[in-house]
Amino acid sequence: MASKALMGAKIRRLRRASGLTQARMAERLNISPSYLNLIENNQRAITVDLLLRIGQAFEVDLQSFAEDDTTRMIGALCDAFADPTLTDHAVERQDLIDLVEASPAAGQAVLALYNSYKALRNENRVLSDQRVSDASDGVATPAVDQVRDYLQAAGNYVPELEAAAEADWSAGELDQSDLYNGLVAFLDREQGLRVRIVPVDVMGDFRRRYDRHGRRILLSEMLDGSSRCFHLAVQTALIRHRGLLDELVARAALDGDQARALLRLAFANYYGGAVLMPYDRLYRAAEAVRYDLEILRRRFRVGLEALGHRLTTLQRPGASGIPFFLLRLDQAGNISKRFSAGADHFPRLGGSCPRWIAHEALWQPGRILTQVVELPDGQRYFTLATAIGRPGAGFRRSGPRQILALGCDIAHAAQLVYADGIAVHADEVAEPIGPTCRLCERSDCVMRAYAPSGVDLDINESLRPGVPYALATS
């Protein structure tokens, strides 16, 4: 039911965007107008044959057109109702699923209202000169939210930056085997910039500094080879492609200078990844080795985090990779980075589910852990997790150890080398997890840290249950 709920709306939007009546569209698809009317009103499921006809008649990318938007909307609604302002209201996940199934438009309206509330909250904080979120509510800064929401809405794919990176590869005659020296020569020739590696006692905690007056790019000696290339590429975007970045930021129409500045940096980082891992080469290599991260990181001479981020951007129409989501977590489960080419249900406001294997990655450095997970609404994902480190500034100022997690819908698992030998569709393989304890309604979870919001507890002095919180059944 959930997978059909938005398909009618998609068909209706496509018809209206094409300027067609139901009768004219039905004629082009060789079906009756009454049948098309039933489809648009979610009274009939769309068949594979009809989907293929739509692709041929209207030249749409079937993978993105057929993608289930319901799970993404439910995840966004869960994020909204996890806001401290709303946690006292007894709204369960199933209530949100019922809402989206009954009326996708109503779900969109709720999200629009919540986004307006966040914008007003942001304006109030700016007026009161409050630059960061209140520490007591744990909410990410509105500027960060705006950037993440925009990138996810765009499918985390920016064709203009892909084109700029490809053009610079050609103009700079860059070579994957010696990318650093190629970028140094390119910056010297095209921008009159020199690159200098600076001792850590001079750079301190800074990894890169642009000396505008001295026409120099200073890099910390603590950066490894791939990180040096990445920072040079990012600085190239900020200087050489400033006009393009400003144009893309203006097009996004975000609220506030802080959000626009963050988005500009996000675009520069995107360009950096595109330079280190050119789209066509990475896409072909990823498909050929079935997304083996170790092979890909060695072939492109990059770190796992940069590779994972880049894999989420492989969404070019006609040559799209697996729609991954990426999360970076600390050992407490707090999510500090998230990118998604598809849907993900992991909350932005706090820790993730302790039953997710990602939390074990820090105990097993050097290994890539796998797990099939099932969320309370029945959606299943194939997930990967591994420990990563970030450069520090010596023994007394070491960098943080973090967790990198990648995941995709279970439908794409067969494309991954990591799924070989795993019965990914078997019920006994899937680990039941939830978004956060306060939103998860699983009554049998022995690892629950909090009772779910709005649910009564079954308190009995004569019985000690095996779970932390016994939930009332009625």
Image (tube, rainbow, N blue to C red):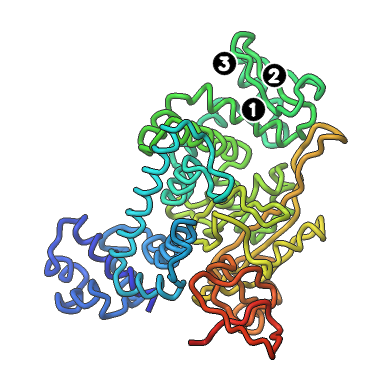
Residue drawn at x 18%, y 74% as measured from the top left: 37
- Give the residue drawn at x 33%, y 58%: 60
Instruction: Looking at the image, tell me whether mark 1 or mark 3 is earlier in sequence order.
Output: 3
- Closer to the camera in the image, 361 or 135: 135
Badge 2: residue crowd in 10 Å (few <14, some 14–19, many ≥20): some
Report helix, strand or loop for mark 1: helix
Q: Earlier in the sequence, mark 1 or mark 2?
A: 2
- The dot on residue 316 is none
Q: Is residue 164 visible?
A: no
Percent from the top left, x then y, of residue 190? 56, 17
Disc 1 packing (10 Å; few <14; some 14–19; many ≥20): many
Residue 274 in picture, x, y percent from top left: 57, 39
The image's mark for residue 232 is 1
Residue 407 sits in which quadrant? Answer: bottom right
Which amino acid, by three-letter code, is at mark 2?
Val
Residue at the far front in the pictured view = 461
Considering only vertical position in the picture, is 229 above or below 26? above
Q: Residue at x 37, y 50 (%)?
A: 115
Identity of the amino acid at label 3? Gln
Q: Quadrant of the N terminus?
A: bottom left
Question: Whole-Å distance between the Cαs marked 1 and 2?
Answer: 9 Å
Q: Residue at x 55, y 46 (%)?
A: 280
Is disc 3 placed on a helix, strand or loop? helix
Find disc 3 in the rendering and name its residue. 191
Q: Residues within 10 Å of mark 3 (few under 14, many from 20)?
A: few
Pick the residue in front: 270 or 62: 270
Distance from label 2 to label 3 (Cα)?
Answer: 12 Å
Residue at image mark 2 = 195
Please state the horizontal and vertical placement of residue 12, each as a whole percent of the image. 23, 64
Tell me, yes or no, whether the two marked residues, 1 and 2, touch with CB atoms within 8 Å. yes
